[in-house]
């Protein structure tokens, strides 16, 4: 029996699919008078922009938490915080990220802003309990290939050379 190739447990997300899924997230979040959207950089920037547009939210800020080095999770480090006057304890703030994996990044954000609403486009089982809203669940061992991480190029077939 052959081992899986790295791409065989991958979930490839196109720009179109990400846009549809981020709009679906916005529809789930409609009905609340959000004061602001905070994007978790870098992955949350595009979904947060789409959600903010769909919900007509003009106040947008970012929080930058580094948790990955290449494709390995490491220690958490807050590189940039959103405006303290805007955030308060997070009441009325919508925090948007692309994915919750282990939940560590969003747990840190939850500690900083306990009343913020945490939302992601995609969720893995370990991180799912920390978010209040998400669109699509994927298995814990699936790697999501986001469109900003990909390039269009020829790929050699697994067998053969044509």
Image (cartoon, grey):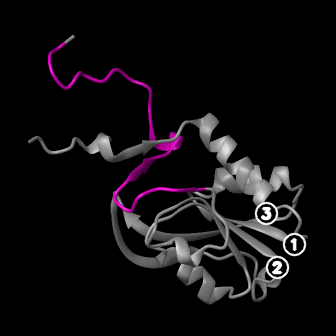
Q: Nearer the viewer, mark 3 or mark 2?
A: 3
Q: What residue is at 31 percent from the left and 41 percent from the top?
A: 7
* Mark 3 secondary-structure assignment: helix
What's the magenta region? Answer: 136-161
Quadrant into which the N terminus falls: top left
Q: Nearer the viewer, mark 2 or mark 1?
A: 1
Q: Is 1 in front, or is 117?
A: 1
Q: Position of residue 30 (x, y in %)?
A: 85, 61
Asked if 100 appears above or below 71 in the picture, the reply is: below
Residues at marks 2 and 1 touching, judged by CB atoms closer than 8 Å: yes
> Rounded to the nearest whole Å, what is the CA distance between mark 3 and mark 2?
20 Å
Q: Nearer the viewer, mark 3 or mark 1?
A: 3
Q: What residue is at 88 percent from the left and 59 percent from the top?
A: 58
Q: Is 58 in front, or is 133?
A: 133
- Which residue carries the number 2 mark? 86
Residues at marks 3 and 1 touching, judged by CB atoms closer than 8 Å: no
- Which residue carries the number 3 mark? 29
Rendered image quadrant of residue 52? bottom right
Q: What residue is at 14 percent from the left and 45 percent from the top?
A: 3
Asked if 73 appears above or below 136 in the picture, the reply is: below
Residue 35's tag is 1
């Amino acid at each position: 029996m052959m081992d899986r190739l790295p791409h065989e447990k991958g979930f490839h997300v196109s720009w179109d699919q990400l846009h549809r899924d981020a709009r679906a997230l916005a529809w789930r979040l409609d009905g609340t008078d959000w004061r602001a959207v905070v994007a978790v950089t870098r992955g949350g920037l595009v979904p947060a922009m789409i959600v903010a547009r769909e919900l007509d939210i003009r106040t947008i800020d970012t929080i930058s938490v580094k948790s990955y080095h290449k494709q390995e999770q490491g220690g958490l480090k807050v590189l940039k915080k959103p405006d303290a006057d805007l955030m308060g304890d997070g009441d009325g703030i919508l925090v948007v990220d692309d994915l919750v994996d282990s939940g560590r990044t969003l747990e840190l954000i939850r500690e900083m802003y306990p009343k913020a609403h945490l939302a992601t486009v995609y969720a893995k089982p370990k991180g799912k309990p920390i978010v209040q809203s998400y669109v699509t669940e994927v298995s814990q061992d699936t790697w999501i290939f986001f469109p900003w991480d990909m390039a269009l190029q020829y790929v050699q077939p697994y067998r053969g050379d044509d």
